Each structure stands twice: as structure tokens, then as C-alpha cells.
């Protein structure tokens, strides 16, 4: 059974940093692209960043480029999201997701972790 479990969320002041983790199990992690998405109440879930199965390719939304870094450790079946220079508008529930073929969407989703940035 596929499981994606996010951790590392919390409350931080603007300008601060957080590191999210996504622990994966139940599938061959090293063959899947991983993504991070976020959602705030009343809004659509939005793409934040993704990383290819090998880690060679990464993609970022314009809103986080230069502040967030995605990475992965295939030996640990874990993906990470390092978030620096956080802004109040980064406040959201952050979800990790796995995809065998990102062009066809993401197959597996975690339950999310809350990130709150105070001003």
C-alpha cells in the first residue's frame, strides 16, 4: 500500500526557514518523480516544485524560485523541501505527491502538513 507522509510543518516568522520531509513507502520511490503542492482555504491546489526520479531535473513555480529547494534521497525513500525567506503568503497546507509520468498527473498524495508564516 502506498504511503506518503509529510512532516516538518509548523509556525515560523516571516524571513524564517522550514524543511519539510516526505517519507514514501509501498512503491519504487526511485522510479517516481516527486512534487510538492500547496493549498489554502478556498483556493485551488497549486504546484510548488518537482524533482525527477534521478534528481537531475527540478522545476519551481515563480513564486518560490530562489527561496525553496527540492531534493530527494532515494536510499531513504524521502523527498525534502527546504523553504527559506518564508513569507506570509507561503502559508498553506503543503502536500507531497508522486508520479511515474508527471505529464499524466500525480498518482499518489500525502495528507499534507500545515505551514504558517506570521508577519
Image: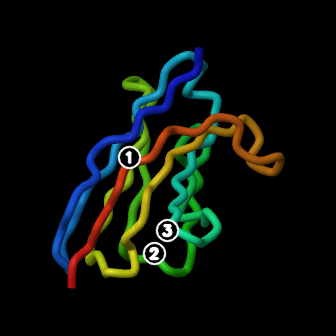
| Residue nearest the observer in this picture, 58 or 95 | 95
Residue located 61% across and 46% down the image: 52
Local crowd at mark 1 within 10 Å, few (<14), some, or many (≥20)? many
| Disc 3 secondary structure class | loop
Q: CA distance from mark 2 to mark 3?
A: 16 Å
Instruction: Indicate the position of residue 9 as horizontal and vertical percent values.
Output: 28, 52
Residue with the most extreme right position: 104
Instruction: Indicate the position of residue 71 as horizontal and vertical percent values.
Output: 42, 48
Tell me, for residue 10, which label it has, or none. Answer: none
Residue highlighted by disc 3: 40
Residue highlighted by disc 1: 80
Q: Is residue 57 left or right of residue 115?
A: right
Q: CA distance from mark 3 to mark 1?
A: 20 Å
Q: Which badge, 3 or 1, is on the more N-terminal residue?
A: 3
| Disc 2 secondary structure class | loop
Tell me, for residue 64, which label it has, or none. Answer: 2
Amino acid at each position: 500500500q502506498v504511503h506518503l507522509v509529510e512532516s516538518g510543518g509548523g509556525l515560523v516568522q516571516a524571513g524564517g526557514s522550514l524543511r519539510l520531509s516526505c517519507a514514501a513507502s509501498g512503491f519504487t520511490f526511485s522510479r517516481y518523480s516527486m512534487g510538492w503542492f500547496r493549498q489554502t482555504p478556498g483556493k485551488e491546489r497549486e504546484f510548488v516544485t518537482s524533482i525527477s526520479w534521478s534528481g537531475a531535473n527540478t522545476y519551481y513555480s515563480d513564486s518560490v524560485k530562489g527561496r525553496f529547494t527540492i531534493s530527494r534521497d532515494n536510499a531513504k525513500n524521502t523527498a525534502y523541501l527546504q523553504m527559506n525567506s518564508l513569507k506570509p503568503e507561503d502559508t498553506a497546507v503543503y502536500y507531497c505527491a508522486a508520479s511515474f509520468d508527471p505529464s499524466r498527473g500525480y498518482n499518489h498524495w500525502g495528507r499534507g502538513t500545515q505551514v504558517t508564516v506570521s508577519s
